[in-house]
Structure formats: structure tokens, C-alpha cells
Amino acid sequence: MRVPRILEVWKMGVVNYSQALKLQEKLTSDRKLHKITDTLLSLQHPPTYTLGKRQTDHNILVSESELKAMGAELHYTQRGGDVTFHGPHQAILYPIISLRDIGIGARKYVEKLELTMIELASLYGLKACAGQKGETGVWVGRRKIGAIGVRISSGITSHGLAFNVDPDLNYFKHIVPCGIADKEVTSLQKEVQQILLPPEEVIVEQLISCYVRTFDYTDVVSKDISSISLDN
Amino acid sequence: MALRMWASSTANALKLSTSASRSALASPAFSLARSFSTGIFAVLEGFKYASSHEWVKHDGPDHLGEVVFVELPEEGKSVSQGNSFGAVESVKATSDINSPISGEVVEVNTKLSESPGLINSSPYEDGWMIKVKPSNPSELESLMGAKEYTKFCEEEDASH
């Protein structure tokens, strides 16, 4: 009989980056202490640029004040990966899970996050694939549709993946996305072109399902958090 | 003198050496020698280490992918058992590295900032990360001996 593996999904709507970070820190700590089960945050951010632990800010092509003038925030984080942009209509998943419980390492974990997005893309007839060496993420041809940046602390993950459903791709012009200069960024909407996509909530649900399947959970509990204050 | 033999099997084990004879340690088995005058210098490699309280069987160099960045503490900084002393990044994942013992960092492998890939290519030799002078030698008693370690690995592997 299979060992039950329970995932708790928090559906959160648009969440400010700092708030999401604080929440992930709390959940990571709780998960480490076995107070909670594997938890998946499903959310979006207002326009936000983020840098990883290597602080590769040479890949930001405008000044911070210009970013602010555009209505975007800039955050330095502890995740892996280079610079990226998050914004409305980009579906984000932050899994706070124990890698030791499933016996995988960082590489396998990142591969599974890639697979999650590849599977979602295939639901729309897109042949997406993982990147070449050094170009982690999910690509349709030479165009990047999904990005990954994670942090692992005592075997507990935080940060995660970002899948471009239909964000404003102009925001990516102000950075060298993920430090890769000669490739484009794309979105699901851009790739399917004239085809009408279902409502975003449906696509996000599909992304969550792809995650659940890829990571082989037996039970899923969903919580709608969008209307609850995060300040507790 | 208390000696413990470590099995290397799937993991980079905690490698301990006296200040005098680092060359006495040869893979795959590593020996821990307690020297009464100089204390024990621990050379930590990779990210797998053994501790009876917090067993981390996680990323070895092959499990991590190519390491692109290593963050290490400064000399003189103290580390404590079970807490993070640095991080490595590969495949867009930064992993905190936890210290199996408490003590003071006496040397940091500066080669790693230019060549983080040494952790992959030479985990038992050039890919060492920090040398720690233990502040609490009794912590070493709690680290697993080889027999327990091998059995532990077998049990872990069997459960997946």
C-alpha cells in the first residue's frame, strides 16, 4: 500500500513579494519542525524584479529608480538563479516541501519542476523542453516560457517556478533574463497565438495538477487564502 | 586515541584529519584521530555528512549538478552543529550547507570562489570547503560510526 503523501495548496491571488518571502520563511521553519505537511503556494506578484544569491545586478539594464518609475519593485533573494521578472498573469508556484521525505536532491527537484511546466505546456499542444546545460528552465524552441529559482535549507525547499501565462513581456526588456542574452522570453498566450485560452484560474489549476502528478501526491487539500490577511 | 572508520559508499563523509597528516587519509575510508594537543580539524566536503541527530542524506556532487557558486564563511567565524555555514548553487538551486559540528573556522578554501566546480570534480581532495577547530569534541562522539552509517544508508535506500 502506498505511503500517503499529502499536499496542502494555498491559492493566494496577487501577493506582494516581501509578504510572500516572509510567509515562505515561516512555512519553511514549520516544515523543518514537521509541524506542517508539504505546502504549495499558488500566487502571482505585482511587477517585481528579483535577483538570486549571486546578486547578478549587471543583468539589470536600467537603474533601480527607473524600475520604480515603471511601478516595479526590486528584491535581492537567497534563491538560486539569475535575474528575473514576476508580474500579473504569470503563474507562480512556491513548493515548501521536504526533499528528504521523497529522497531526491536539488537536481532531481529542479528537473521535476521543469517537467511540471513542460506538461502544462503540452496541454496546449506546445512542445516545451528543459534547457540545455546551464540554462535551467522551460523553453519552446529558443524562447523561454518558464523560469526556476529555488532555495534549499536543511532539505526544505522554498521559492520555485514561474510560468508565463500572459504577462506583459515588455518588462523583460529591462533585464537580461536569467543572464541569458541571446534568447527571447515568451508566454503561453504568445505561443498559442490566435487560440483563445481558458480563464487564467483554469490554467493555474492545471499547473497545480501537473505539479501534484509529477510529485506523486496521494491527497491534496486546497485552501483559498486570497481574502485572508497575511499579517498573522 | 579514539578512531572511527567511515564508509564512503554513496556519500561524501565527514573527513577529519589531524593538522599533521592529511595525506594519511585515503579514500574510500577516512579515519578520525583525536590528537590531544592540537584538537581536531574537520575538513568538510560536499554536502553529505553524518550526524546522529540531523542526518542529511542529500546532495552529493552527482546529485547536485554542476556547482556554479559557493558561499563560505570567513576565517574566525564560528559555526555550530546543525546550523548553516554557507551555501552552494547549481541548477538554479541554492542549498544551505549545515555544519555537523560547532567550532571556529580556521581556514576557508579560497579556490572555490573561482572554481566552484571543484566540489564536483574533486570532492575528496581539492573540493574541501572549510576547516573547523571543534569547540565541543564530544559532538564528534555523536557522529555515526561506519557500521551504523552503512546500515543507515541501506535502510534509507530501501525505503525509496
Image (cartoon, coloured by chain):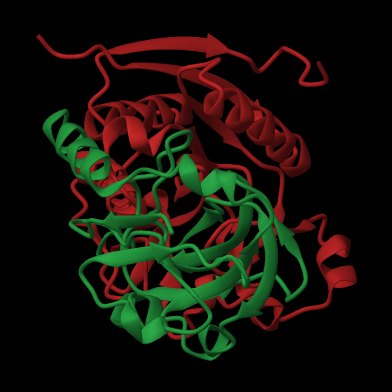
Display colour for chain A = red
Q: Which is nearer the eye, A10 or A128?
A: A10
Examine the image and state in which quarter residue B12 appears.
bottom left
Q: Residue at x 86, y 61 (%)?
A: A68
Is residue B45 found left or right of B63 in the rendered image?
Answer: right
Is residue B140 visible to us here? Answer: yes
Q: Assign the C terminus of chain A to one quadrant of the image.
A: top right
Residue plotted at (27% across, 51% down) = A108
Q: Residue at x 42, y 59 (%)?
A: B47
Please provide percent x and percent y for residue B115: 47, 88
Of residues A118 and B40, the one drawn nearer to the viewer in this rendering: B40
Q: Is residue A17 left or right of residue A64?
A: left
User: Measured from the top left, where is residue A138 in percent x and y?
Assistant: 33, 59
Image coords of residue B99 (percent x, y): 56, 54
Q: Which chain is green?
A: B
Looking at the rendered image, the quarter that the N terminus of chain A falls into is top left
Which one is in front, A2 or A179?
A2
In the image, residue B110 above or below residue B77: below
Image coordinates of residue A18 in percent, x first then y, are: 77, 42
Q: Residue at x 50, y 49 (%)?
A: B140
Can I make out residue A52 in this image?
A: no
Q: Is residue A211 above or below residue A82?
A: above
